Image (cartoon, grey):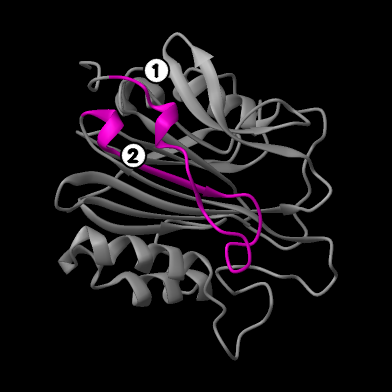
Amino acid sequence: MCILMVLYQSVPGYPIVVAANRDEYYDRPAEGPQQLLAAPLAWGGRDARAGGTWFGLNAHGLVIGLTNRRTHEDQENDPQRRSRGLLCLDALQCRSATEAAAFLAAEPPARYNAFNLLMIDQYELLWAAYDDTPRLQPLAPGLHVLTNGNINDADTVRIQRARRLLQHAPALAWSDCLPLLEDVCRDHEHGVTERETLCMHRLDGRYGTVSSTILALTAPLTGSVYRYAPGHPCTVPYTDYVGLLALPRLSPV
């Protein structure tokens, strides 16, 4: 049950800001930020089991974020369907959010288990809810939070908490906004179940937050912020990965 927190066209100097916690089984191997594609250049973490990614960006300034989608408690995945992480990797071959949405719409029906996909560039923020076919919604500038249901679902405890903690983020200088984002990613709200904290530690010891990414994208890409913690962000420090983005400027769409 990953969480993606987006500040779109809201933070001065950084039109795309995303804080993302990945929640997964601890025994599912993954690799940290790296070059994923050569044409276009794309970067992100890699799922070492299926080969895809859950969150990445490319040289055109396109950001793709994926969460699994769960609409009812007894929902089961079909193991014969294609990996959703590979779809996320495929989307990073596109030049824009609009192109990524068109690519997704052209995929055969029922090819994937249910998922949510965020497609973000300097011009558009698009959310796709996929339940055998995609349902697309453009989103306005501002704060948006996504877990494994609908975007900005007011009944989801994690979304309520994230929105409350980040409500004043656009008014902050970046030097204050960045540590706030880190604090939100490592947050443990009191009085909620272990499934509802932003940094998740499930009591069964098998599942929880396995990594955290903070991305603040600007032009040129080398002026961006790209930080990654390979574990619970409450105990594992963030490492700076902006050196991966060795390009002088955003490529034109």
Report whether residue 92 is seen: no
Q: Nearer the viewer, residue 38 or 66?
A: 38
Relative to 94, say whether 11 is above or below. below
Mark 2 neighbour density, 10 Å: few (under 14) some (14–19) many (20 or more): some
Residue shown at 63% from the left, 50% from the top: 230
Q: Secondary structure at mark 2?
A: strand
Q: How many marks?
A: 2
Residue shown at 31% from the left, 19% from the top: 247
Residue 85 shown left or right of residue 213 in the figure: right
Q: Which residue is mark 1?
A: 94
Classify the position of the C terminus by image quarter: top left
Q: Nearer the viewer, residue 101 or 2?
A: 2
Residue 244 - label: none
Q: Nearer the viewer, residue 75 or 249?
A: 249
Q: Which residue is mark 2?
A: 126
- The location of residue 121, given as percent across then percent down, is 28, 33
Q: Nearer the viewer, mark 1 or mark 2?
A: 1
- The location of residue 24, given as percent across then percent down, is 71, 52
Q: Is residue 92 magenta?
A: no
- Find the magenta span and give its range: 220-247
